[in-house]
Image (cartoon, rainbow, N blue to C red):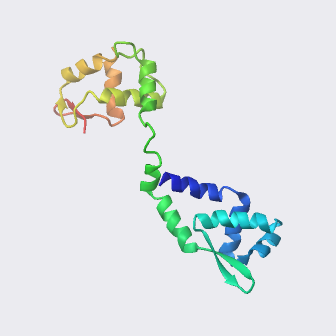
């Protein structure tokens, strides 16, 4: 689907092709009419129409001695709906390593033993480090203060700040009545 998305954008990535689509959205035109309206050579207009026909946005019908081009509005709607769906857009980034930023930040802020040199003050970097620390907690398992502190002490001596930030960012929950922490 990402190849189709690229092809679609390439076809529309030309000001004259966009103008042709705009004109054809109003009414059908022949190559000669479009050429006159856009102050282009008919061969240039034919080239643009071929690109648009390739992705199914325009079609031609014979009228007297001329081919008259019209916008395939239904195809434009179908392509827009299909190409810009959540699934399609998500599939276009399927091969992107979404954890690369987190790994770089954790690497930049960590010593060889895995402990933190410092707790990041920049929000995005802090969130990356917190997501890294969160991997030590099993979902829905409860941790008392002692167990939580033992895990956090592997990363930094300022356990209080790490604990506060994990709770503040909603990464771990605190049951104030039992004093237990957990990750959902």
Indicate the quadrant where residue 148 lies: top left
Indicate the quadrant where residue 94 lies: top left
Residue 109 lies, with reference to residue 167, above or below; the image says above
Is 99 displayed left or right of 5 in the figure? Answer: left
Q: Nearer the viewer, residue 122 or 64?
A: 64
Q: Look at the image and tell me in which quarter the C terminus lies.
A: top left
Examine the rendering and report whether any part of residue 165 can be seen: no
Name the residue at 52% across, 63% down: 80
Name the residue at 75% across, 73% down: 31
Examine the rendering and report whether any part of residue 132 can be seen: yes
x, y percentage for residue 84?
50, 58
* Numbered label tally: 0
x, y percentage for residue 131?
35, 31
Residue 37 lies, with reference to residue 11, above or below; the image says below
x, y percentage for residue 7?
58, 56
Residue 70 lies, with reference to residue 6, above or below; the image says below
Name the residue at 32% across, 21% down: 160
x, y percentage for residue 3?
52, 52
Q: Nearer the viewer, residue 95 or 49?
A: 49
Is 54 displayed left or right of 166 in the figure? Answer: right
Q: Nearer the viewer, residue 87 or 135?
A: 87
């Amino acid at each position: 689907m990402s190849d189709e998305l690229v092809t679609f954008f390439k076809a529309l990535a030309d000001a004259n092709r966009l103008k042709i689509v705009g004109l054809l959205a109003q009414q059908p035109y022949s190559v000669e009419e479009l050429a006159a309206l856009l102050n282009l050579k008919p061969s240039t207009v034919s080239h643009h129409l071929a690109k648009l026909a390739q992705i199914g946005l325009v079609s031609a019908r014979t009228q007297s001695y001329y081919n008259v081009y019209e916008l395939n509005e239904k195809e434009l709607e179908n392509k827009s709906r299909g190409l810009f769906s959540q699934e399609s857009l998500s599939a276009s980034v399927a091969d992107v390593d979404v954890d690369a930023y987190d790994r770089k930040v954790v690497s930049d802020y960590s010593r060889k033993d895995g402990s933190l040199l410092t707790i990041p003050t920049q929000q995005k970097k802090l969130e990356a480090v917190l997501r890294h620390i969160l991997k030590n907690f099993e979902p829905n398992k409860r941790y008392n203060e002692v167990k939580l502190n033992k895990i956090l002490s592997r990363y930094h001596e300022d356990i209080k700040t790490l604990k506060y930030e994990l709770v503040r960012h909603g990464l771990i929950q605190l049951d104030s009545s039992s004093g237990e922490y957990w990750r959902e």
